[in-house]
Image (tube, rainbow, N blue to C red):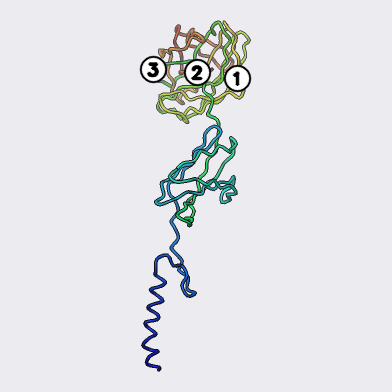
Amino acid sequence: MIDSFLFLTPLLVLGIIALLGFVGCDRVWGFEHIPDPLPPPTGLTATGYDGFVVVSWDNYNNASGYNLKRGTATGTYPMTYNINAPDTAYPDMAVTNGTEYFYVLTALVDSRESDTSDEVNATPAPPPPTFTPFVTSVTLGTFQNQLSGWAGMVIQVGPNPLTVKMLGRYFGTGNTNPHDVKIFDPAANADVVRVTVDVPSGTVGKFTYTTLATPVVLNAGFTYYVVSLELIGADHLYIPDTTVQTTSAATVMSAVTGSGQDIYTPTDGPGHTWGPVDFQY
């Protein structure tokens, strides 16, 4: 009797093991087979636009759908979008510009849900405003640093008032300092507006601009000076053998320099400038 039991026991064990490994059987005689977890989806990205966020991801093999989960705080996702395969992108239109959104994704294979992807985030926002640069092209002159004071160009506004929205200065090789740039009204002997332009934050060989907190209106037919503050021995600027080509909103009458007491001297002739400087309108 005992010998028979000992002989049959290995056979019973082998039979149970075989049943546990049988495809499609998760529970046999009280034993539970737990399948391996499904790996998370990959390639999740989120990009914010004006009024919506586009979320995309890599295709997941054999997926029947996806759960895209969203929240406004990291690690918390109260909203879920159910997305059918084979789609691998979703435009989230239920957003508010300026609010940051956080996303994770799981894949659905048959009745199983995968592990959760890494979190991504995006903030929808309107595009930055676009204005028109006054200077359309530059022919650079001599590069030097032998001037202290204000330097730039004299402009005469055309037949229509001109609303200026940005001021800028050219970024020459080796420039390392921010520069104050302003518009001066010689008739009133007063500044119209003055801002600091972080020139080195831009690109060498291009203008760097600062947006005015409040746009300013230049009167039709009036003359103004657009100038940058320079310091001898500091950052280089281009002297007025530099010329600019511009839009028809105003005319460059000459280059101009001035002291800290706002005593200005026009130099050279039409189209010439120090700096160079620019504005957008």
Where is residue 101? Give x, y as percent: 56, 42
Q: Residue 173 appears in which quarter of the rendering?
A: top left
Measure how far apart labels 3 and 1 are at the Cα level.
32 Å
164 in relation to 37, above or below: above
The outermost residue toward the bottom is 1
Q: Amino acid at mark 2?
A: Thr
Q: Quadrant of the C terminus?
A: top right
Tell me how many marks there are: 3
Q: Secondary structure at mark 2?
A: loop
267 in relation to 80, above or below: above
Q: Secondary structure at mark 1?
A: strand
Where is residue 130? Give x, y as percent: 51, 23
Residue displayed at 46% across by 18% down: 276
Residue 64: which numbered mark, if any?
A: none
Q: Amino acid at mark 3?
A: Thr
Which class describes the residues within 10 Å of circle 3: few (<14), some (14-19), or many (20+)? few
Q: Which residue is mark 1?
A: 215
Q: Quadrant of the N terminus?
A: bottom left
Measure how far apart labels 3 and 2 are at the Cα level.
27 Å
Which badge, 2 or 1, comes first in the chain's sequence?
2
Where is residue 50? Give x, y as percent: 54, 32
Q: Are marks 3 and 1 in contact (CB under 8 Å)?
A: no
Q: Amino acid at mark 1?
A: Pro
Residue displayed at 51% across by 9% down: 250
Q: Which residue is mark 2?
A: 132
Q: Which residue is mark 3?
A: 142
Which badge, 3 or 1, comes first in the chain's sequence?
3
**Viewer-nearest residue: 273 or 246:** 246
Q: Nearer the viewer, mark 3 or mark 2?
A: 2
Residue displayed at 37% across by 83% down: 10
Where is residue 232? Give x, y as percent: 47, 22
